[in-house]
Image (spheres, rainbow, N blue to C red):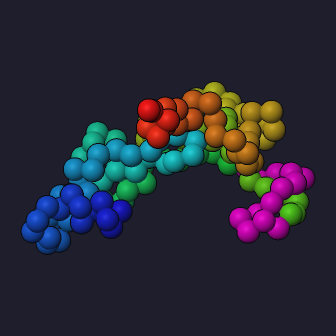
Amino acid sequence: MFFAGVNLAGPNLTPSTFRDGLFRAGVQGGNALSPTNSRGRHGIWSGTGEDLGGSDDVTLVWWNSTAKGEDEIGNAGTGLYEYVSGGKRYLPGTWPTTDPGLFDTSKSVTIYTTIPADLQPPSYPSPAAKK
């Protein structure tokens, strides 16, 4: 956030140009691996004026006391959070009205071991391979 605000502030860095830079950054993220973040007015938070908070969406989680896996520093253990519906994120006004699969391990994910197919980066040919 800091570098985005500085870069988008322009040549005259002030608190106002920093804020304006963050507002111009637009909406970022919005998938299972990256929360939706924005500042300013982007139509996400109606009736609130300028969004200064940044975080715009939420996901549902539940504690599975029997799930096994590693923690953030690689220690194996038992008990993990399960992300419902594969970590689907919800913006204001889009909360599910039907059961999204809370407490259902077949509809939840603890740890992504590979990037989901719809979030895979594009594959580009290597410029070094050209002769």
Residue 45 is inside the magenta segment: no
Work out which residue is located at the far front of the displayed protein and give it. Answer: 131
Residue 46 appearing in the image? no
For the residue pair 99 and 13, the one nearer the viewer reads as 13
Of residues 26 and 114, which is closer to you in this image? 114
Answer above or below: position of 122 versus 29: above
- Identify which residue is drawn at 33% across, 67% down: 2
Residue 117: % across, % down? 62, 30
Residue 43 position, x and y percent, is 28, 39
Which residue shows up at 78% across the image and 65% down it?
Answer: 74
**Residue placed at 87% from the left, 63% from the top?**
77
Q: With 61 as the anchor, is 45 left or right in this view?
A: left
- The one nearer the camera, 8 or 89, is 8
* Magenta span: 62-75
Q: Which residue is most to the left?
A: 12
> For the point 21% across and 58% down, which residue is it?
8
Indicate left or right for 24 with 112 as reference: left
Q: Measuring from the top left, give residue 87's x and y in whole percent.
A: 63, 41
**Residue 113 appears left or right of 23:** right
- Quadrant containing the C terminus in the rendered view: top left
Residue 66 in the image, given as x and y percentages of width and height: 90, 53
**Image quarter of residue 85:** top right
What predominant SS class does the magenta segment belong to? strand
Residue sticking out furthest to the top: 98
